[in-house]
Image: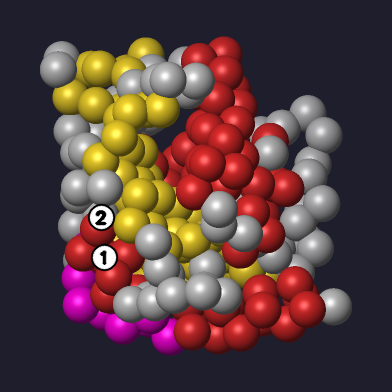
Amino acid sequence: MSTHDASAQYIHQFIPGVAGSPTLLLLHGTGGDETDLLGLGHALDSDAALLSPRGTVLEQGMPRFFRRLAAGVFDRADLIRRTHELADFVADAAARYGFDPRRVIAVGFSNGANIAASMLLLRPETLAAAALFRPMVPLTPETPPDLAHLPVFIGSGRQDPIVPVDEAEQLAALLRHAGAAVTMHWETGGHGLTQGDLDAARKWMAETRLAISAAVAR
């Protein structure tokens, strides 16, 4: 079902899932839209609900989730503002569609992975877990969040021309310092996703889904 959320101005799709399943917040890369990661979401967890917004920032006509000043140089003020807008949208969507806000897992690619990482650092209560494909360090918060035991999957490429290896490692270290349980997965390839990424993330997702269910039941 496609709809337009008037409060947050996100064009998005919501696809209901099986009762008790998580909701995957699908966040596309630069130039993508709300349909880009639906297939990935289904592949990671066929029972999950899918919430897929389109980024509201345009860069030469290509949707993004926040502005950048140059390649790899983010507009920090805009990133912070858009991160809070996206977190508010997720809360509004939970109320609107009736999914459990305690079971939201972000699945982001590239620019989408970066705003998901920013949400972990600025609005961690929004997410129960996150799968970040080809992310960078979005920002360093003034006050580290409490991410105690929050599961995070990072899928990176050793030959990625956009995200250097040390950048991905810095993000993993930043999240681990905040207490997150980070699973780092490396592919030999570049910025595009591979079958290896999918296989590793699917295994992580199955384990994470059980952990979230146990935490919610406590």
Q: Which residues are magenta?
A: 193-203
Residue 178, image x and y in percent? 77, 54
Residue 180: give its label.
none
11 shown above or below 198? above
Camera-side residue: 21 or 132?
21
Q: Quadrant of residue 195?
A: bottom left
Question: Secondary structure under badge 2?
Answer: loop
Residue 55 visible from this viewpoint: yes
Residue 40: give its label.
1
At a point 26% along the width and 47% down the height, the residue shown is: 1
Decide if residue 132 is on the left or right side of residue 178: left
Question: Secondary structure under badge 1?
Answer: helix
Residue 168 visible from this viewpoint: no
Residue 42, image x and y in percent? 28, 70
Residue 37: give its label.
2
Camera-side residue: 198 or 106?
106
135 shown above or below 15? above
| 2 and 1 marks in contact (CB < 8 Å) | yes
Alpha carbon separation for disc pair 2 and 1:
5 Å
36 shown above or below 154? above
Camera-side residue: 16 or 73?
16
Q: Quadrant of residue 158?
A: bottom left
Residue 200, image x and y in percent? 38, 81
At a point 67% along the width and 79% down the height, the residue shown is: 213
**Is residue 154 rendered magenta in the image?**
no
At a point 20% along the width and 70% down the height, the residue shown is: 194
Q: Main secondary structure of the magenta part?
A: helix
Decide if residue 21 is on the left or right side of residue 12: right
At a point 39% along the width and 61% down the height, the residue shown is: 16
Q: Quadrant of the C terminus?
A: bottom right
**Is residue 199 rendered magenta in the image?**
yes
Amino acid type indicated by mark 2: Leu
